[in-house]
Image (spheres, helix red, strand yellow):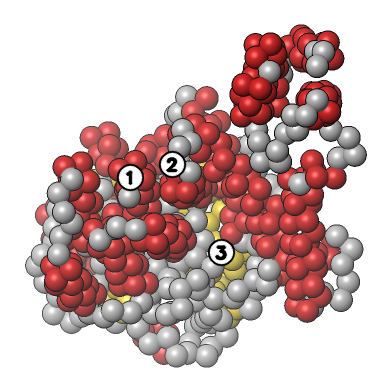
Amino acid sequence: MSKSVIYGLLLSILMVIAPHANHLPAWVSSLCVALLLWRSYLTHSGNPLPKHWLLTLLTFACLGGIAISFHTLFGREAAVTLLILMVALKFMELRTARDVMVLIYLSCFIVITNFFYSQSIPTALYMLATLLAVVTTWIHLYAQNIALKPRLRIATALLLQAIPLTLILFVLFPRIQGPLWGLPQDAFASSGLDDRMSPGSLSRLSLSDAVAFRVSYAGKPPAREQMYWRGPVLWQFDGRTWIPGNTAYSVAPQFTELDQAIDYTVTLEPHNKTWLFMLDMPNKISVPSSLTHDFQVLSKTPVNSRLRYEARSHLVSHANLREANWQIQRALQLPPTLNPKALQLAATWRDNGANDAAVVRSALAYLNQQGFQYTLEPPLLPGANSIDDFLFTSKKGFCEHYASAFVFLMRAAHIPARVVTGYQGGEFNYIGNYYIVRQSDAHAWAEVWLSGQGWVRVDPTAVIAPARVQTNVAAAVPASETAALPFITRMTSNPPAWLSNLRLNWDILGFRWNQWVLGYNTERQFAFLTSLGMENITWQNMSIIMTTGIWLVIGLFALFMLRHLFANQPDKVQAAWLGLCRKLAKSGLPRAAHEGAQDYAARIAAARPELADTIRDLAARYSALRYGAVRDEQAQREFLQRAAALKI
């Protein structure tokens, strides 16, 4: 096996497994690098490959390591890790062309596994470049005398020829519902909001610039401070963590709308949870879902793929004007012995004879006037009385601190209250005319129940850092903390025009990719085929059309590559050479069927010395014009004239 083939295969394997480094245990990445470097050294030095018993021992050790790391040998993570280790180990025993082909096939399969973790445009482009390197190595295996640039051209041509077949399969192949990977327990990654809130949970989420969903409005969009995207509602508090508690309530929620309805379309990224995000208060939605007693919209199944739905909400409403007694009691529950200072503060407001609305105003005024700070890096509150520590000692927190403390104070003052989590705001893409809501827009606020008004939204963060609601988190945190925010979040404040246009255009491209490539599901497939005039769409008909299209493309490529066999007449250069060969045949020197131009000329020169120089010159000119890169019209005319002038 030549060294150049081994080095080409080494590059291909490195490109294939490099994107997996973030998903592999550290010992796997280190072992793969060590094995590849070891094989490179053995190839360069010419030393013998390791013994089979050593590789067998390493194989079983790797199996044990995977079992320990993942507690199984099955599932996405364990299977991909095992496959990568097997490729690295197989590379250590590479000896024959068959071994190279096995590694090339395995590399092509690992290329697919990268899409288990990301299906973005950069991932697709990188995998295309990786596939180009793999195909180039494959060509080099069977044509080692071809230089690198011609190999790259051939590999590029092969990939370009595969595009029509790829498009046919993409458009017509039946869409698969469910995960790419066969085991649902690890087929989907959970991302975004959780149904538990404790100090630090949302501040950590604010460090992610991943897109949660995108929104386009049918008419004029609402003001940014009205964009509260409702998610999990939390009722139960244990002194540190808020959770939904018992959700098995069947009471139908009711609200009276006080403003005109607003219609919009949401494209939700998969998050492996059931909640769907809508503006307060949700009214209608176009996908199968249910509305809980606390106005949370839940999908019938977890959102494991990108979901697009149309929705309608009322931004001003009276929700549940007459609340059930059990729900009121539930919204007043508190740990009885925790946070005595907060309990005393709330009792003071209530003892002053204030009504519920006045107590709410007193709490907001306290947060506004007592030196509280909005920060991404609040101090830890490890004690049992975390609310007291926050309200009277640290006075530094993120939105979850303020929402939690405010709801605690309201319940301590005998005002029903609950925590609502979701997203607030969003970045307007003025080029695509839609809003981008990122994980960094995650937010928590409060709702209190007031007689005659029902559930009323109160956002205590807005009185501490109004810029958080009016602009974004980057405008609200201290300047010293903005460096910790994602680059895109920082750039939304006041970016250069060229950078803003570049970023928003890239997001539009990603949005279209998500809609038309990753979002090409069964419904879109049927709609697209119907628009092309196809009726009675069934899998049988689609299979027939797909098979016919594939064979048609293959036939067209075959005709193109074999077009010279169907030509009626040879080209002028070939016709002149064949005429010259017929002249020589008449003089008793016929050309054998296997003889090339140069060999034939050498035989003529030996038999007819007087023609040696002329026939060698004509053979060289013919070879250059016929098989070389020479396409000069003057050279072609000179060859035709010299061939015609030759006298036998």
Per the rendering, the mark at residue 144 is: 2
Q: Position of residue 585 (x, y in %)?
A: 80, 30
Sequence order check: which comes first, mark 1 or mark 2?
1
The quadrant the C terminus occupies is top right
Are circles 1 and 2 on residues that touch, CB within 8 Å?
Answer: yes
The answer to whether residue 443 of the structure is visible from this angle is: no
Residue 15 drawn above or below residue 631: below
Residue 478 falls in image quadrant: top left
- Which amino acid is tagged 1? Ser
Q: Position of residue 472 (x, y in %)?
A: 42, 43
Q: Position of residue 91 (x, y in %)?
A: 28, 58
Element under label 3?
loop
Residue at image coords 66%, 48%: 161
- Which amino acid is tagged 3? Arg
| Residue at the spot of label 3 | 306
Circle 2 residues within 10 Å: few <14, some 14–19, many ≥20:
some
In this picture, residue 284 sits left or right of residue 84: right
In this picture, residue 275 sits left or right of residue 464: right
| Residue at the spot of label 1 | 2
Q: Position of residue 113 (x, y in %)?
A: 43, 63
Element under label 1?
loop
